[in-house]
Image (tube, grey):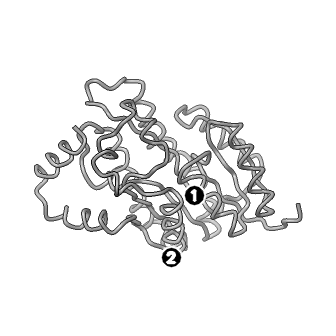
């Protein structure tokens, strides 16, 4: 491998869906990659694919980011490699589709750990070096769910609201340092997320099947938005309109609407 480039991008949840597509886009732009996911065998296959096709260096690091200890160990591994992470993509996330009182407590805890705590830990670990260098990019994959309450997916929606709020705050803090911070907010995406939810069949996907997006399209939009410095990147004209008009919709009406869609 003759690549002498020393720019690195880290992508969590890189074994499929939006994460994998973002990894491909970054590799095509010449970034060396740190790929993180639970499935080591899948990551190794992706590593081979990207190294062969794009002549970049790839580290495949298996970690379960729903376990805080593994997040800490992952950060230590990357720091021991002496790598400056130029682009951080916090894509890993999980959801659950059940009424709150019926949801397994351990599943809810894992969701908060993965969607909130791990994202926060990783960002905190790599942002100081970006600020010192006055250079870097961070993409946090949120959701249109971030803009509303989510009956029957209450904790998932709440975690994405956190991701969006954190991203916007960091964008303001990081702007004087020349660091771009962006929240990618898609609607439902065909990524295998639905199967990961406990019901195995989210009504959101069933009722709005024509609006379900493809991961490669969402990833491309998000990546272009990050490079343009767009702080909040909502994918799809219908969802952009929904979020806009929600500003003028009474909160009780929004709650009822989401409860009908998902209940």
- Disc 1 crowd rating (10 Å Cα; few below 14, some 14-19, many 20+) is many
Q: Spatial distance from mark 2 to mark 1, Cα to Cα?
A: 19 Å
In the image, 153: left or right of 79?
left
Residue at disc 2, secondary structure: helix
**On screen, residue 216 above or below 42:** below
Q: Residue at x 55, y 31 (%)?
A: 67
Q: Residue at x 34, y 57 (%)?
A: 211
Whichever of labels 2 and 1 marks the residue nearer the N terminus, that label is 1
Residue at disc 1, secondary structure: helix
Between 229 and 203, the one lying in front of the other is 203
Residue 259 horizontal/vertical position (percent): 19, 42
**Residue 127 got which mark?**
1
**On screen, residue 72 above or below 224:** above
**Residue 263 got which mark?**
none
Residue 104 horizontal/vertical position (percent): 36, 23
**On screen, residue 148 above or below 25:** above
């Amino acid at each position: 491998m003759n690549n002498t480039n020393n720019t690195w991008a880290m992508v969590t949840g890189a074994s499929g869906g939006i994460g994998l597509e973002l990894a491909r886009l970054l590799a095509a732009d010449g970034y060396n990659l740190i790929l993180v996911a639970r499935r080591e065998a899948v990551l190794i296959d992706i590593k081979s694919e990207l190294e062969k096709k794009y002549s970049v260096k790839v580290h495949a690091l298996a970690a379960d980011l729903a376990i805080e200890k593994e997040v800490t160990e992952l950060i230590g591994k990357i720091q021991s490699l002496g790598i400056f992470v130029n682009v951080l993509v916090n894509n890993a996330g999980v959801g659950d589709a059940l009424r709150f009182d019926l949801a397994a407590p351990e599943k809810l805890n894992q969701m908060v750990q993965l969607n909130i705590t791990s994202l926060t830990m990783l960002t905190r670990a790599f942002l100081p070096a970006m600020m010192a260098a006055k250079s870097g990019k961070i993409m946090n994959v949120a959701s249109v769910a971030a803009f509303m309450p989510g009956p029957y997916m209450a904790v998932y929606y709440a975690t994405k609201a956190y991701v969006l709020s954190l991203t916007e705050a960091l964008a303001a803090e990081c702007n004087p340092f020349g660091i771009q911070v962006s929240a990618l907010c898609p609607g439902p995406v065909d990524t295998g997320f639905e199967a990961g939810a406990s019901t195995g069949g989210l009504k959101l996907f069933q009722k709005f099947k024509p609006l379900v997006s493809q991961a490669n399209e969402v990833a491309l939009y998000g990546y272009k938005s990050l490079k343009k410095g767009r702080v909040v990147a909502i994918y799809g004209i219908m969802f952009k309109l929904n979020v806009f008009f929600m500003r003028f919709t009474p909160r009780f009406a929004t709650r009822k609407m989401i409860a009908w869609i998902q209940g």
